[in-house]
Image (tube, rainbow, N blue to C red):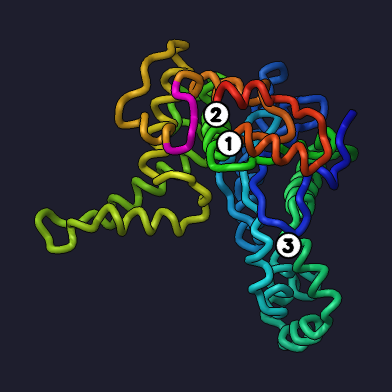
């Protein structure tokens, strides 16, 4: 039996989630439909841009994403405590960025903007409601999916549902689950044979990370033998961590190397020995090295609502009053 949404999503608490939304009938409604030849690939950029807008205004960090031909994945962190640090006026301004009033759309520099801002900011009940919504997973997904559906239906000249029911969510209990899920999401195009390598995977967070790293490295690379060259890597890492893609449980370079190697193993279908320089990464997170590639490749089939080290899964199971969670055996194998 399907669990109630309120038991799947933690309200007003910090948490990590993996969410998936599919187009109706699993049709190619925002990719290239191989059966009709119709290309909707430009809609993928709609989704990426919408994710970027929402992550800048919600109390949400984007860990990973992949926009496929008929569905998309996002790994994100809901940071409710961050929303509590916003002033009332900041809450209103963030809400306006997503739900812009008609008068403000018509005149962004309206003289009465300050008046309306102060009036709404003084409404404590309304501000509290908006603050909670800006740190709520369901509202984040609603604000992502509904505008995309309206734009697509308008372009197609039709009405009706665009998305196949509500989004699916999985709760990630620890850094081990987060790393596995992120790698699974970032390598989706490689698994689907849509890309040869992670950097060729368009509309994914891994390609965005690599592109950002290359740009920053080229822009800020120090001249040889300068007094500042010794801390170049540290400064570059700081700039990368300040970008819109956060949540990494390990260093950026470590993650890129791990995903690149894992993608090669999945693409070739051979399970080589994990290189010595990557072994400590998995050991730190209590991940079984022998199960790593298989766990990433089949993540979607092995796990269900809750993912993490088995001791964390058991704790969550007791908290929710469950006798069992699908995926416990997979967790025992993958996480030591």
Residue 222 on image: x %, y %:
19, 57
Is residue 186 highlighted in magenta?
A: no
Q: Which residue is mark 1?
A: 177
- For the residue pair 91 and 36, the one nearer the viewer reads as 91
Tell me the crowding category of disc 2: few under 14, some 14 to 19, or many 20 or more residues within 10 angstroms, Cα based: many
Magenta: predominant secondary structure element?
loop
Residue situated furthest top in the rendering: 270
Tell me the crowding category of disc 3: few under 14, some 14 to 19, or many 20 or more residues within 10 angstroms, Cα based: many
Q: Residue 134 bears which disc, if any?
A: 3
Q: Look at the numbered disc 1 and give the secondary structure of its residue.
A: helix
Q: Look at the numbered disc 3 and give the secondary structure of its residue.
A: loop
* Mark whose residue sits in front, 2 or 3: 2
Looking at the rendering, which quadrant does residue 5 occupy?
Answer: top right
Find the distance from the CA under tag 2 to the CA under tag 3: 33 Å
Residue situated furthest left in the rendering: 225
- For the residue pair 73 and 179, the one nearer the viewer reads as 179
Looking at the image, tell me whether mark 2 or mark 3 is earlier in sequence order. Answer: 3
Find the distance from the CA under tag 2 to the CA under tag 1: 9 Å
Q: Residue 335 bears which disc, if any?
A: 2
Looking at the image, tell me whether mark 3 or mark 1 is earlier in sequence order. Answer: 3
Q: Look at the numbered disc 2 and give the secondary structure of its residue.
A: loop
Residue 174 seen: yes
Q: Residue at x 35, y 31 (%)?
A: 278
- For the residue pair 283 and 257, the one nearer the viewer reads as 283
Tell me the crowding category of disc 1: few under 14, some 14 to 19, or many 20 or more residues within 10 angstroms, Cα based: many
The range drawn in magenta is: 284-289
Q: Residue at x 64, y 39 (%)?
A: 312
């Amino acid at each position: 039996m399907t669990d109630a949404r309120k038991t799947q999503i933690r309200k007003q608490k910090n948490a990590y989630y993996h969410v998936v939304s599919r187009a109706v009938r699993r049709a190619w409604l925002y990719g290239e439909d191989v059966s009709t030849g119709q290309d909707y690939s430009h809609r993928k950029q709609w989704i990426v841009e919408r994710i970027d807008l929402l992550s800048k205004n919600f109390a949400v960090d984007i860990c990973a994403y992949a926009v496929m031909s008929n569905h998309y994945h996002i790994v994100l962190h809901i940071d409710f405590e961050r929303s509590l640090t916003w002033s009332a006026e900041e809450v209103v301004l963030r809400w306006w960025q997503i739900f812009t009033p008609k008068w403000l759309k018509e005149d962004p520099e309206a003289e009465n903007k300050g008046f309306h801002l102060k009036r709404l900011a003084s409404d404590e009940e309304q501000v509290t409601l908006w603050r909670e919504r800006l740190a709520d997973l369901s509202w984040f997904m609603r604000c992502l999916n509904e505008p995309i559906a309206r734009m697509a239906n308008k372009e197609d000249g039709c009405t009706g549902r665009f998305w196949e029911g509500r989004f699916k969510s999985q709760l990630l209990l620890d850094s081990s689950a987060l790393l596995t899920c992120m790698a699974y999401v970032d390598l989706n195009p490689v698994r689907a044979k849509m890309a040869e390598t992670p950097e060729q995977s368009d509309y994914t967070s891994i390609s965005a990370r690599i592109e950002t790293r290359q740009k920053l490295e080229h822009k800020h690379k120090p001249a040889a033998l300068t007094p500042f060259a010794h801390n170049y890597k540290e400064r570059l890492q700081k700039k990368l961590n300040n970008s819109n893609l956060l949540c990494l449980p390990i260093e950026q370079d470590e993650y890129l190397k791990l995903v690149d190697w894992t993608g090669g193993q999945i693409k070739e279908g051979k399970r080589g020995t994990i290189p010595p320089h990557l072994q400590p990464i998995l050991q730190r997170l209590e991940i079984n090295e022998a199960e790593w590639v298989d766990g990433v490749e089949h993540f979607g089939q092995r796990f269900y609502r809750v993912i993490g080290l088995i001791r964390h899964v058991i704790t969550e199971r007791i908290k929710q009053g469950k006798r069992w969670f699908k995926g416990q055996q997979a967790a025992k194998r993958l996480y030591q």
